[in-house]
Image: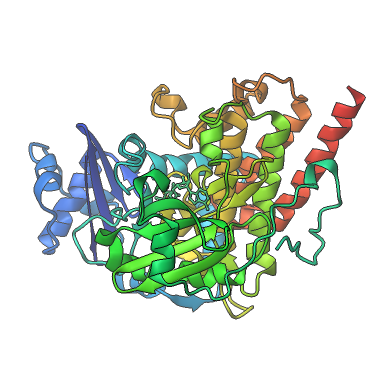
Amino acid sequence: FATQSKVCGSNHIAYSNCHGHEVFFINGELKEKESFCKALHSLEVNDCTFENSLGSSCSGLDLDLSLADSPLKPERSLLQKEVREESTSHDPSQDTSKEKKDDDPETLSPIYKSGIGAAGVLVICCTFLCPCLYKKKKATPSTVLEKDPKSTDSISPFNVNSSSEKVPASPLRVPPSPSRLYQSPKLRRLESVHLNLSQVARATNNFSPSLKIGEGGFGTVYKAELDDGQVVAIKRAKKEHFAKLRTEFSSEVELLAKIDHRNLVKLLGYVDKGNERLIITEYVPNGTLREHLDVQRGKILDFNQRLEISIDVAHGLTYLHLYAEKQIIHRDVKSSNILLTESMRAKVADFGFARIGPVDSDLTHISTKVKGTVGYLDPEYMRTYQLTPKSDVYSFGILLLEILTGRRPVELRKPADERVTLRWVFKKYNEGNVVDMVDPLMEENVNTEILYSLFTLAIQCAAPIRSDRPSMKAVVEQLWGIRADYLKGVRKG
Ligand SMILES: Nc1ncnc2c1ncn2[C@@H]1O[C@H](COP(=O)(O)OP(=O)(O)OP(=O)(O)O)[C@@H](O)[C@H]1O
């Protein structure tokens, strides 16, 4: 597996070779080899060379090097200005309408428009790297993506290393119902979030492998019991990613320390000393959503559980977007970051990529590096580097499809035309075939209208243009409505 990329002026070119399967990418779009090589030649003429496998991959092609159909962008300074990292800017509504005009034929219905575009863009996002990434899931950290608009480095931007029960006083308060009576165990915040290293060493038996519960791109996770008997999860940064992780960990710590919601994993403490970065969070005992979808935890998730998990995740994200002290954008919503309790309530975990949203209420986005996981990444954010809460909505849409179908965002074992879940869903949806898409492991017969509403919602969330996506709050409200209809049907029998 080889991935290379380079930013040449305002153009971002990338190449990946996975077991001989080559993928070419220019400015966020998947390209044919010939068109890619043409672009490469024109960049080389301008002294921006791309070496090794990428260059040799183009050799032997008989190229007509006229630049008339070059996919490269000419306005270098303009683009660079726009993607200035960490700056905030007003949303140019003109931009949005332009994108709409480009992407959406007037004659198509919103869903159709969204779906087609989303499918297309997702193919770009997913097919580019996933074939390799999914295979290597835990062996390498590269399921997580980072794309820096400013980088002139010839190393891939896809080289990321890795990867109290207060309900907000808001209209989102959930009326008591049997399914929501669950309260996770009361967790006391540690007296000081700064633990000392010896406390942690004691709690983890000096990071004993027997206490290891998981491994992510950023580090290893241990289960531990603190001196006061409290059971916690401790994430220990891998040393090789240490320098890079400094900011990630401090961002996670700062953000987590402020939030308190039953659908978000709580920060209890951290250690930031010498050569150690450790994050101590509440321990969530029942594995990840992905493990449950893969039936690695014994039981198959039934429809009601899937619906409740979707609602829990939507609650957690709505809290981050609307009710936290500062708006927080998670940026890495995915099934392996959803942890489940014993009573199958869901909690969103892993705030390593989280960012505070635009501080000024007049601002609609922040311009920043692209970070997230391939397959869940908002295509508009990838293209423009503009981050908004709608990027989480996009990832939630992909997650909802995952929950309904059981499929990963990209399913490598499926035939080529079924591989990208969003595209496959959209095709089936247009054929009116929602029942066929439901996870075959789930044996219940769920009312077609309910399924249709859920797939419609997921496709809307995964619209290619953020203005076509609902807010998380609207998603929650729609999910409540769907749940009410579902429960009515169940009561009627
Ligand atoms: N608070 C927690 N409670 C219980 N288990 C946890 C907790 N946090 C993480 N884990 C376990 O550790 C595993 C690794 O978590 P981690 O967040 O490091 O990686 P990831 O999200 O799977 O991958 P990446 O960080 O690369 O995206 C999880 O899949 C989960 O099984």
Q: Give the residue displayed 42% in from the left and 75% down from the top.
A: 86
Q: How is the image coloured?
A: rainbow
Q: Give the residue displayed 50% in from the left and 64% down from the top.
A: 354
Q: Is residue 463 left or right of residue 384?
A: right
Residue 105 lies, in percent from the top left, at 57, 45
Q: Quadrant of the N terminus?
A: top left
Q: Is residue 159 left or right of residue 402?
A: left
Residue 384 lies, in percent from the top left, at 44, 62
Judge by depth and name the residue closer to the eye, 185 or 57: 185
Relative to 174, is 427 above or below? above
Judge by depth and name the residue closer to the eye, 94 or 67: 94
Judge by depth and name the residue closer to the eye, 224 or 148: 224
Q: Give the residue displayed 17% in from the left and 52% down from the top.
A: 40
Relative to 37, is 473 above or below? below
Residue 152 lies, in percent from the top left, at 22, 66
Q: Is residue 122 left or right of residue 297?
A: left
Residue 22 lies, in percent from the top left, at 23, 37
Q: Give the residue displayed 32% in from the left and 56% down from the top.
A: 160
Q: Place residue 292 in its image quadrant.
A: top right
Q: Is residue 162 left or right of residue 153?
A: right
